[in-house]
Image (cartoon, grey):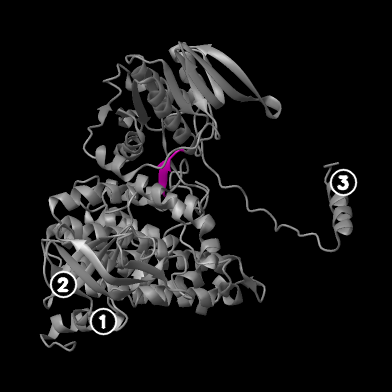
């Protein structure tokens, strides 16, 4: 209630959300204000994730919130998008944690797992008792995941996995990893439990971005997993890409939250920062920046709302998500750059949020499909010409 | 235990640039955000905790139009079992007495052991509805509660009294208690909770349903008439006292003397 944050909603986009969607958004918003924002600067400095909040987020119900059953909330796509928006208003690392848990780990188990796998993992992942990660990217295979080198070889009732994964959010924290490996040339998904011999997560240190988030390398050396740990429902690149569509959908909403945080901070600051005996908000150049930010945020809100409605109706395709993910990350990063500019020298300290968000967004605009790759996906859809392969 | 909690949907006035509506008797609400009154949030939390400890039914009630449903649904998501919306054009323009009249007419037909209200609302800020409602219901009330325990037909309540003091009193049930900030730390409304109550029907009651004449409620039934709403005149610029601490204190004392403060 004491939170001074006011989320920009210039065109009353709120009106487009259902009461339930608004209520869910508001409860996550106040949780972020009360529980997360007071400690984020400290965790960002120390490069630690606030793990003590993991069960609270479970109680709130944000893990796998769009999934049905198994202790998940079964929310509308817009509601689950708004959760991402509010979490990322706190920090992209917080939203990443929840996205990876829900969209990249719980989603494939829910969509492609056996009933036994679902029963074993999903209820505990919904409460945060079990944490998941997603191992697709390798050090040498980022935009081209199809080239991945990690191999799984069948040996009786087991598979033996060898390889390594890089840039894995939650990698060192996770109790279970969804590892994508090639088995006789075909990509398949495996659930690898923490503690399995030969499996190890190693934190990647000295990041300028997503500091309050665990980013790791996964090392897999002769890791033997029982065949019951294979995700039976999918084969090929389609499997991991379908997960990424879910996660990118969340990012498209999430980045709006970071942009709203930057806007709110900059707008507030401009009204109280006095230069030449007047608030800098009275200068045309400052207003122009705020107007740009507000316009882009509003456009992104409308785009994401429509995307959510298409997801609900079953008409959303991955190339729609690409446009929204690409647009949201770009505009959010630009908003942070402008916001930092309005804050002047003060903007470079962690007393203000904007530079933390800006640094984070350098990752967000890169992971889960870079800005350029998403441009090529949309370009392919528009022209019928494939400029990627 | 039957627990009733009275709540209100209020505008967030903390950060807003307030504007008076065209009729001069209210605020322009277009740009305002609305939420449950902060003190009512403590009351709902207290009600749900009593239910969790002693079992029973929590009923949330508000007076308002269909927009006010959202605070009832929020109370349901926090753990209330049923909700009643007192919705009638006749309720508009009510003073605290007319609100208490409507609430009383609804509550008198319900079983109750404890009625909880917020101590005050952040918009009207009269703090009168709880006391008036207790009088109409003819039950004891304890205002500004900061602690509450119920045991065997009696409530032990810690509450604020004059002079910055607190005291503990015991009252027999049924009673009415108004919640002061600090009574508890309200829970976050969980997403599962919100989902669970998405389809719960909220009963609406008109003045007629409550056996009230339209003249007994709303503006007609009010004893206080709001003539107009004014924004406070813009103050002169604040003065920041410069110089060393001693010099600033000396200037401050001088200023206070000049203006009769000392």
Can residue A291 be seen here?
A: no
Closest to the observer, B73 or A221:
A221
What residue is at 10 percent from the left and 61 percent from the top? A233
Count the numbered circles shown.
Answer: 3
**Residue bounds of the magenta highlight:** B32-37
Instruction: Confirm whether the magenta stretch covers residue B81.
Output: no
Q: Are marks 3 and 2 in contact (CB under 8 Å)?
A: no
Labels 3 and 2 within one chain: no
What secondary structure is found at the residue carrying circle 2? strand
Number of the front mark, 2 or 1: 2
Q: Chain of mark 1?
A: A
Where is A57 relative to B213, above or below? below
Number of the front mark, 1 or 3: 1
Q: Chain of mark 2?
A: A
- Measure the C-alpha gap from mark 2 to mark 1: 25 Å
Q: Tell me where residue B9 sits by quadrant.
A: top left
Q: Tell me where residue A134 sits by quadrant.
A: bottom left
Quadrant occupied by the N terminus of chain B: top left
Where is B114 relative to A122, above or below? above
- Measure the C-alpha gap from mark 3 to mark 2: 89 Å
Quadrant occupied by the C terminus of chain B: top right
Q: Which mark is residue B257?
A: 3
Q: Position of residue A382 (x, y in %)?
A: 14, 82
Q: Chain of mark 3?
A: B
| Relative horizontal placement of residue B253, taking residue A24 as reference (left or right) | right
Labels 2 and 1 within one chain: yes
Q: Position of residue A169 (x, y in %)?
A: 36, 67
Q: Which residue is mark 1?
A: A143
Where is A388 relative to B166, above or below? below
Closest to the observer, A132 or A261:
A132
Q: Which residue is mark 2?
A: A153
């Amino acid at each position: 209630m004491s939170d001074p944050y006011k989320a920009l909603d210039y065109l009353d986009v709120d009106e487009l959300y259902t009461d339930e969607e608004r209520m869910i958004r508001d409860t996550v918003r106040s949780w972020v204000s009360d529980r997360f924002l007071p400690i984020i600067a400290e965790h960002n400095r120390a490069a630690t994730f606030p793990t003590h909040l993991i069960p609270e987020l479970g109680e709130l119900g944000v893990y796998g919130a769009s999934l049905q059953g198994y202790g998940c909330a079964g929310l509308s796509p817009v509601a689950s998008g708004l959760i991402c928006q509010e979490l990322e208003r706190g920090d992209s690392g917080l939203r990443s944690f929840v996205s990876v848990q829900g969209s990249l780990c719980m989603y494939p188990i829910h969509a492609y797992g056996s009933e036994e796998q679902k029963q074993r993992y999903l209820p505990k992942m919904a409460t945060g008792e079990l944490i998941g990660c997603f191992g697709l990217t390798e050090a040498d295979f980022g935009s081209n995941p199809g080239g991945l080198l990690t191999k799984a070889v069948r040996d009786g009732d087991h598979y033996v996995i060898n390889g390594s994964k890089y840039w894995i959010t939650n990698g060192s924290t996770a109790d279970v990893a969804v590892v994508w490996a090639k088995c006789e040339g075909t990509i398949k998904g495996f659930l690898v439990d923490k503690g399995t011999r030969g499996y190890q997560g190693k934190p990647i240190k000295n990041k300028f971005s997503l500091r309050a988030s665990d980013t790791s390398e996964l090392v897999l050396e002769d890791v033997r997993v029982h065949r019951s740990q294979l995700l039976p429902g999918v084969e090929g690149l389609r499997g991991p890409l379908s997960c990424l569509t879910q996660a990118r959908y969340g990012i498209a909403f999430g980045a709006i939250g970071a942009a709203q945080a930057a806007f709110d901070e900059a707008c507030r600051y401009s009204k109280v920062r006095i230069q030449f005996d007047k608030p800098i908000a009275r200068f045309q150049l400052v207003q122009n920046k705020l107007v740009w930010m507000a316009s882009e945020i509003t456009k992104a809100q409308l785009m994401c709302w429509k995307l959510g409605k298409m997801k609900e109706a079953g008409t959303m395709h991955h190339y729609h998500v690409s446009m929204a993910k690409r647009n949201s990350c770009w505009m959010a990063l630009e908003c942070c750059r402008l916001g930092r500019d309005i804050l002047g020298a003060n903007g470079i300290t962690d007393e203000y949020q904007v530079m933390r968000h800006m640094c984070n967004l350098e990752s967000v605009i890169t992971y889960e499909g870079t800005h350029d790759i998403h441009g090529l996906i949309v370009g392919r859809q528009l022209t019928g010409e494939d400029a990627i392969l | 235990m039957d627990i009733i909690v009275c709540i209100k949907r209020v505008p967030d006035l903390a950060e807003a640039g307030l504007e008076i509506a065209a009729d001069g008797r209210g605020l322009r609400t277009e740009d305002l955000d609305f939420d449950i009154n902060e003190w009512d949030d403590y009351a709902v939390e207290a009600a749900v905790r009593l239910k969790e400890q002693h079992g029973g039914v929590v009923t949330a009630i508000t007076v308002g139009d269909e927009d006010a449903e959202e605070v009832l649904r929020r109370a349901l998501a926090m753990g209330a079992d049923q909700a009643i919306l007192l919705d009638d054009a006749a309720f508009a323009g009510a003073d605290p007495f007319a609100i208490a009249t409507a609430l009383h007419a609804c509550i008198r037909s319900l079983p109750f052991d404890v009625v909880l209200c917020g101590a005050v609302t952040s918009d009207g800020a009269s703090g009168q509805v709880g006391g008036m409602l207790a009088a109409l219901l003819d039950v004891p009330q304890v205002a500004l509660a900061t602690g509450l325990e119920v045991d065997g037909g009696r409530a032990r309540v810690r509450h604020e009294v004059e002079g910055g003091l607190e005291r503990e009193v015991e009252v027999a049930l049924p009673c009415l208690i108004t919640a002061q900030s600090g009574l508890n730390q309200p829970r976050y409304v969980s997403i599962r909770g919100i989902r669970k109550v998405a389809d719960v029907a909220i009963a609406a009651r008109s003045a007629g349903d409550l056996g009230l004449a339209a003249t007994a409620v709303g503006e007609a039934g009010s004893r206080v008439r709001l003539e107009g709403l004014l924004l406070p005149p813009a103050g002169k610029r604040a003065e920041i006292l410069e110089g060393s601490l001693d010099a600033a204190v000396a200037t401050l004392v001088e200023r206070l003397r000049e203006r009769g403060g000392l």
